[in-house]
């Protein structure tokens, strides 16, 4: 149940929108990111301090689930070979329940997690909700993680929706560990390189012009640093491109034919004519 809640009143007031949860790393299922504006990042690792989490309802039924991934520590006989999101039991003790004393409430493979906004302008942080279907006899379960910064120890509760033939269940987790943060994605190396390049070029030009004007007593275009070099640069680039193209063609020809390309016949003829002309003088 890769979910969490955001402590960000400004985000709630702005009415941010987000899509399905995306795990940052499959090897770290407790770290989850919700893309959108802004990005919300969640860390459910503190809720995995025990092998499984337990909630109860008003009928004395117990509910078992994992905070970050499918439930494996607790098993139900009717859910053998399935990816389990949550288990309900009414008889026996964990971690293993026999068929007839438990039920699988949802298949973890059907996970659909979203973020629900609080009322616009109310300052109420949004809630994170994960829904699972495919449980025993059509059962489904919704897991809600509600942020409560004043609760250092999380609370767990469960309820059954009697309006849907008693097959829909809700598990609610409240506490400080259910709170996430609004996160700003850092710039990539490519973006940083472009920024450094632009800043460096600006400093170079401004510093060079200032030095040439103040120390070199230069004015106008002459104040541009290394002006002669920059005027030659386009021609140097052209020469480099032509050289690379020529050497590349020669290398490709040698790769295909096993030898260097033949010399230009017209060049041989011109050289011979020049030699003959030298002999006649």
Image: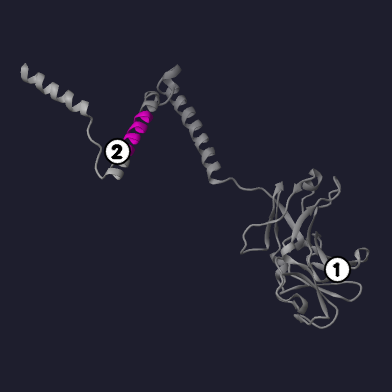
Q: Is residue 255 visible?
A: yes
- The residue mark sitting in front, 1 or 2, is 2
Q: Quadrant of residue 180?
A: bottom right
Q: Label 2's element? A: helix
Label ID, residue 250: 2
Q: Label 1's element? A: strand
Tag 1 and tag 2, C-beta contact below 8 Å: no
Extent of the magenta region: 236-250
Residue 89, position in %: x, y?
A: 83, 77
Q: Quadrant of residue 150?
A: bottom right
Of the 4 image quadrants, the one containing the N terminus is: bottom right
* Residue, disc 1: 158
**Against 216, is 130 above or below?**
below
Magenta segment, principal secondary structure?
helix
Residue 50, position in %: x, y?
A: 72, 74
Residue 40, position in %: x, y?
A: 71, 52
In the picture, measured across the screen, residue 63 lies left or right of residue 272, that is right
In the picture, measured across the screen, residue 125 lies left or right of residue 256, that is right
Q: Is residue 134 magenta?
A: no
Q: Is residue 173 visible?
A: no
**Against 137, is 176 above or below?**
above
The residue depicted at 72 percent of the width and 62 percent of the height is 2
């Amino acid at each position: 149940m890769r979910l969490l809640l955001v402590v960000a009143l400004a985000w709630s007031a702005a009415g941010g929108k987000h899509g399905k949860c995306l795990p940052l790393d499959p090897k770290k299922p407790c770290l989850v990111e919700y893309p959108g504006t802004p990005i919300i990042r969640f860390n459910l690792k503190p809720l995995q301090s025990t092998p499984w989490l337990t909630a109860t309802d008003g009928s004395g039924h117990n509910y078992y689930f994992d905070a970050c991934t499918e439930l494996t520590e607790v098993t139900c006989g009717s859910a053998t070979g399935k990816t389990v999101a949550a288990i309900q039991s009414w008889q026996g003790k964990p971690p293993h329940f026999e068929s007839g004393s438990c039920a699988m409430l949802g298949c973890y493979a059907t996970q659909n997690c979203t973020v629900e906004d609080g009322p616009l302008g109310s300052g109420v942080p949004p809630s994170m909700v994960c829904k699972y279907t495919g449980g025993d006899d059509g059962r489904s379960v919704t897991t809600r993680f509600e942020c409560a910064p004043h609760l250092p120890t999380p609370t767990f509760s469960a309820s059954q929706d009697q309006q849907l033939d008693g097959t829909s269940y809700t598990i609610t987790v409240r506490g400080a560990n259910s709170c996430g943060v609004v996160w700003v994605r850092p710039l990539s190396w490519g973006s940083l390189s472009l920024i450094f390049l632009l800043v460096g070029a600006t400093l170079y030009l401004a510093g060079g012009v200032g030095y040439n004007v103040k120390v070199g007593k230069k004015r106008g275009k002459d104040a541009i640093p290394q002006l002669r070099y920059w005027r030659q640069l386009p021609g140097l680039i052209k020469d480099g491109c032509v050289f690379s193209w020529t050497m590349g063609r020669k290398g490709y020809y040698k790769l295909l034919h096993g030898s260097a390309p033949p010399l230009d016949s017209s060049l041989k003829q011109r050289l011979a004519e020049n030699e003959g002309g030298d002999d006649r003088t």
